Image (cartoon, rainbow, N blue to C red):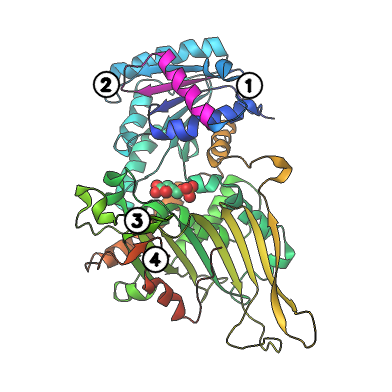
Amino acid sequence: IDKPNVVIVIFGATGDLSKRKLFPSIYRLYQNGKIGEDFAVVGLARRPWTNEVFRENVRDSIQNASLNAEDIEAFSSHFYYHSFDVTDTSSYDHLKILLEELEGNYQTDGNRIFYLAMAPEYFGSIANQLQQNGLKDSAGWTRLVIEKPFGHDLESAKALNNQIRVAFNENQIYRIDHYLGKEMVQNIEVIRFANGIFEHLWNNRFISNIQVTSSEELGVEDRARYYDHSGATRDMVQNHMLQMVALLAMEPPIKLTPEEIRSEKVKVLRALRHVDPDKVDEFFVRGQYGSGTSKGEVVKGYREETEELAGSTTETYVAGKVMIDNYRWAGVPFYIRTGKRMKEKSTKIVVEFKDIPMNLYYKDEAEKHPNLLVINIQPNEGITLYLNAKKAGIGSIAEPIKLSYTNNGVDGINTPEAYEKLIYDCIIGDTTNFTHWDEVAYSWAFIDSLLQAWSASQPKFPNYPSGSMGPQAANDLLEQDGFHWWPIT
Ligand code: BG6
């Protein structure tokens, strides 16, 4: 295993992401031998913590995440805290001295990862301060990891990107989309391109439509301020949903290199048909949850969650028909939907194949059951193929049968967390599962066309009860094309 030595500097080390995802993931890498003893983590935030308080926090976060944590003492000794003001130049000077010291102690060869896990308004200025204060001038490599949101629309994303690019090259920038770290999202490419029986049929001659659902049970929780300015379209569609569409629709790469794979994805995103303002309702549906029942409990509607959300017109649900205007996909709708406070937490892809021209074996023409390939991303991981086979007994009636494979519990080990894989990829310098600037730009251009079309009218919210699968209009969207959403369970 490739185990480069590295110092990871986390901006926003007292925040939620660090505690929930980053520390446990770094721990698992350590436990699995993917990072050795030659590493250090420097946590930065405003609070005046000591190393000891920080380490206590790190240990806490791991205890929740792992059952056999016997070496956590040794592990947490690699963590250092540095109280930091991102707007103050002297903070960067002190950081530089600390890094040089740690590099001596841990023999990390000057390899540095700067991980921005904090408010996006500082991304650009931090990147520049790092360069201006010489923090990039080490003997090894330096990389910048950026959490979302990467901009609010195309224009702001461009401005942010230009700012960052002054200090870092594109190949030093690792833009996180944590869906790309999910085992089954990574599997889309392999299922498609390592199987003759799928790849030959993977086009508009044999596929009638593709459905991508990412539903959540939770509501806005304590993120009202961020979420109300974002909405489901920016929060989920611009990044996660369109990334899954790109992986489903891309051409086979000529080589398994980050450049080749990402350039195929870019081509898909370039071919997305922008939303025509006069036809927005034929293609997209927005929703906001009202009160309802979630897990047997009565829950509030979005507008009642906090005072600042009263009267909000932010969408907590989006369903859409995405068209990809290229040779392979002309005419095939990619239906997507995502929302908060839906019936259950699930991410799933259904590929619906066209029926054969004349199927004599259906009992009832009205109840067709075409072949489906279902890719289960979460909570279950696996694939299910729906075929037709003869119903046992007299006659020749076809009934659907299921061939299922589940990833869960293979070898009794849980599949690695998305963040664990992404942090490791960053350490070894593999940018494949990070979004290239071109992907960000083309997806924002598409989202901008949608949001602009919507801005012309006021939505009638709330329009779906908590605990449901969304507004009725999302069903009509498919019915107008002669399809329906396949159940997600
Ligand atoms: C994040 C969004 O990017 O993805 C959240 O900001 C959302 O609003 C989350 O809940 C969903 O991720 P996952 O991995 O739980 O499906």
Residue drawn at 60 percent across, 53 percent down: 380
Which amino acid is tagged 1? Gly
Q: Which residue is mark 1?
A: 36
- Where residue 264 appears, x then y in whole percent? 56, 56
Crowding near the residue tagged with mark 3, few <14, some 14–19, many ≥20 C-alpha atoms within 10 Å: few
Give the magenta-colored segment's residue range.
40-64
- Mark number for residue 121? none
Q: Earlier in the sequence, mark 2 or mark 1?
A: 1
Residue drawn at 49 percent across, 44 percent down: 178
Q: Which residue is mark 3?
A: 298
Q: Which residue is mark 4?
A: 470
- Where residue 451 appears, x then y in whole percent? 30, 62
Quarter assignment of residue 302: bottom left
24 left or right of 81 in image: right
Tag 3 near tag 1, CB within 8 Å: no
257 left or right of 195 in image: left
* Nearer mark to the viewer, of 2 and 4: 4
Question: Is residue 46 in the magenta section?
Answer: yes
- Where residue 376 appears, x then y in whole percent? 59, 57
